[in-house]
Structures are given as structure tokens and as C-alpha cells.
Image (cartoon, rainbow, N blue to C red):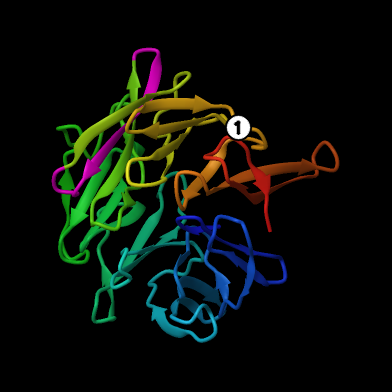
């Protein structure tokens, strides 16, 4: 799984983990204290590693400040058992949030369980306004979710209170959301406390990714990236920042990448990507990682899907398997 800008962790069936912090140029062994939760459950920054793990005793939030040699654990006090969770860590590492998800039925829907730790380190249960994806903008906790992922929420107090944020001047209704309503992707934090927010918008017979940037309280529209065709309701754009002014946008359902710079948008059909991109991460404008799902079959019905991480060293033009 991707674990930060140019960082990824791969765990094999036996539980052994490998870590890259340089966009796949090299890998080293990482000792994890347990099985990672399903989802974006590991974050790496320098020698600091944060992970949400699951075992027979439940779910735990783990932190290592020495590259995985030693760990400190906190129990995540779930009210319902689950092995699915997303971890969000502020750029300075002082704030963490865990959004655990209990999968429901078509009638009941999913149940989110949110836990937040501030500088004091205490893990506190909070009420999530919806299921979705978490990110930090400085000390503000952000959540994108709601029907068709059409809402962005912000909390100034670690999840104790929430308010919807207008994106593009509007706030989508909570219920009865029109299928053409824009879908808001996971905000991408920057080191200065601002965020980049990708929004997939429907325009006539086509679609585009509209980028917004700035502090969460005052997002400003930036580049708009046209897509090749129409995209279904609720589809999210896979996007990564790649430097101070660079953003990479993956075309939904395609291996095409759109490279966004201060000078404009350039689209490339990269070599080596076996299919659509599930997740992207760049350490700079040239070096990045992509997670894709590889499908293999030994017969007509005996098929398996495996996540695979690939690396680029030329700004996304070509990709190679790593690890």
C-alpha cells in the first residue's frame, strides 16, 4: 500500500513487510507489530511510522519513531469489530485520526467509527458526519463523504464539531443528491497547512477534474483537467501532488495520466502501466509510485486480483515493477 509521498509498504502472505521511502529505488525490511488493517492504514515520514493493525485482540494504533525497531501501541476502542480502517496523520505528525468502517448491507449502509489523537496523544472517539476519507489541513481535520462523495466537512477541534465546506461556491444537499453532482476526492495535504482538493465534475457529455487549493476555509479554483469521456456518478479522481506546483491526475478507468504544472496540462499514455491506477504518490515531479490491481486467471473462473506497486523516475512517462 502507498504510505506517503514516494513511500510504500508491501506485505506478503507470511506477514513480512518491505518499505521504500525513495519511490521504489530501494526497499528495506520493516518490522510491523501486527497485520495492517485493510485500507490506507500505514503512514511513513522519515523514521516515523504510524500503522493501524488488527489481531485477535482488536484494533490498535501503533507508532514507531525509529523506523520500526520499537513501537508504542494504543487500543482503538471499537464499538463494533472490523478490520477496515483509514489512517490520516498531520504533516508534522502531531495529530492522527483513524476512521474504521464496519461494512453494512445494501439496506443498512456502512457504519463509520472515528477516533482522533491530538498533540497530547489521547485517542478520543468522535462522531463522524459521514463515512468517507480523512485528511489534515494544519490542525483542521477534513472528511469527504456523503452521498456520491459530494460533501467536504471540516472540524477545527479534532472531530468534536463539524461543518460543511463550500467547494466551488456550493454545498451539496445531504439527501436526494443529483447524479450529476460533483464528487470530491480526498484532500491532499501540503507541508504549509494548505490542501489540494480534486473534484470530479460532469460537463455535458464529458467530465473533468477541477483542482482547488489553499486553506480548507478558503479554497480557490485552479486548473481544470478535461477527461476523455463521461464518468459515472460518485466516481473519485485519483490524484497526487508532485511538487510545489505539480499535480498528477489519473484518468478514471484508463492508464492515461495528466501532468499538471504552472504552464498547463499535458496528457501521457505511459508505458508499463497494466491498467487503471488505484492510488498515486510522488516524492517530486519525476519520482513516484502507482498502485494498480493485476488480475490473473488459471482458468475461466479461477481468477485472483492482486495489488501491485510500480515506480516511475521520469515523471510518469514509464513505469516498472519494484520490490
Indicate left or right for 237 with 36 as reference.
left
Q: Position of residue 278 (x, y in %)?
A: 54, 43
Residues 299 and 214: in front is 214
> Disc 1 on helix, strand or loop?
loop
Indicate left or right for 166 with 257 as reference.
left
- Does residue 2 show up magenta in the picture? no
Q: Position of residue 41 (x, y in %)?
A: 47, 64
Q: Position of residue 170 (x, y in %)?
A: 16, 33
Residue at the (24%, 41%) spot, across then down: 213
Q: In the rendered image, which residue does mark 1 sit on?
A: 270
Q: Quadrant of the N terminus?
A: bottom right
Q: Which residues are magenta?
A: 204-218
Up/down of 153 relative to 30, above or below: above
Q: Position of residue 315 (x, y in %)?
A: 52, 40
Q: Answer few, some or many: residues within 10 Å of disc 1's Cα (few below 14, many 20 plus, some between 14 and 19).
A: some
Residues 87 and 321: in front is 321
Can the viewer see residue 49 in this picture? no
Amino acid at each position: 500500500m502507498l504510505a506517503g509521498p514516494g513511500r510504500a509498504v508491501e506485505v506478503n502472505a507470511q506477514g513480512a513487510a518491505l518499505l521504500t521511502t525513495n519511490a521504489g529505488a530501494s526497499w528495506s525490511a520493516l518490522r510491523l507489530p501486527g497485520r495492517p488493517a485493510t485500507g490506507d492504514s500505514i503512514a511513513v515520514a522519515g523514521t516515523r511510522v504510524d500503522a493501524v493493525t488488527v489481531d485477535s485482540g482488536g484494533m490498535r494504533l501503533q507508532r514507531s519513531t525509529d523506523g520500526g525497531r520499537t513501537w508504542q501501541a494504543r487500543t482503538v476502542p471499537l464499538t463494533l469489530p472490523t478490520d477496515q480502517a483509514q489512517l490520516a496523520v498531520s504533516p508534522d505528525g502531531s495529530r492522527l485520526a483513524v476512521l474504521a468502517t464496519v461494512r453494512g448491507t445494501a439496506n443498512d449502509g456502512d457504519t463509520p467509527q472515528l477516533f482522533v489523537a491530538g498533540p497530547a496523544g489521547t485517542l478520543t472517539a468522535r462522531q463522524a458526519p459521514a463515512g468517507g476519507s480523512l485528511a489534515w489541513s494544519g490542525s483542521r481535520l477534513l472528511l469527504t463523504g456523503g452521498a456520491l462523495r459530494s460533501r467536504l466537512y471540516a472540524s477545527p477541534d479534532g472531530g468534536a464539531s463539524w461543518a460543511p465546506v463550500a467547494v466551488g461556491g456550493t454545498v451539496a444537499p445531504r439527501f436526494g443528491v443529483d447524479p450529476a453532482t460533483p464528487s470530491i476526492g480526498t484532500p491532499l495535504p501540503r507541508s504549509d497547512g494548505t490542501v489540494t482538493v480534486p473534484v470530479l465534475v460532469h460537463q455535458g457529455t464529458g467530465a473533468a477534474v477541477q483542482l482547488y487549493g489553499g486553506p480548507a476555509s478558503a479554497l480557490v479554483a485552479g486548473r481544470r483537467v478535461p477527461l476523455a469521456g463521461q464518468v459515472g456518478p460518485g466516481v473519485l479522481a485519483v490524484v497526487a501532488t508532485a511538487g510545489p506546483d505539480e499535480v498528477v491526475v489519473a484518468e478514471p478507468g484508463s492508464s492515461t495520466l495528466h501532468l499538471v504544472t504552472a504552464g498547463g496540462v499535458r496528457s501521457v499514455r505511459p508505458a508499463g502501466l497494466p491498467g487503471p491506477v488505484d492510488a498515486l504518490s510522488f516524492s517530486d515531479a519525476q519520482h513516484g509510485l502507482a498502485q494498480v490491481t493485476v488480475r490473473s486467471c488459471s482458468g475461466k473462473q479461477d481468477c485472483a486480483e492482486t495489488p501491485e506497486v510500480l515506480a516511475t523516475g521520469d515523471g510518469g512517462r514509464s513505469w516498472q515493477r519494484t520490490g
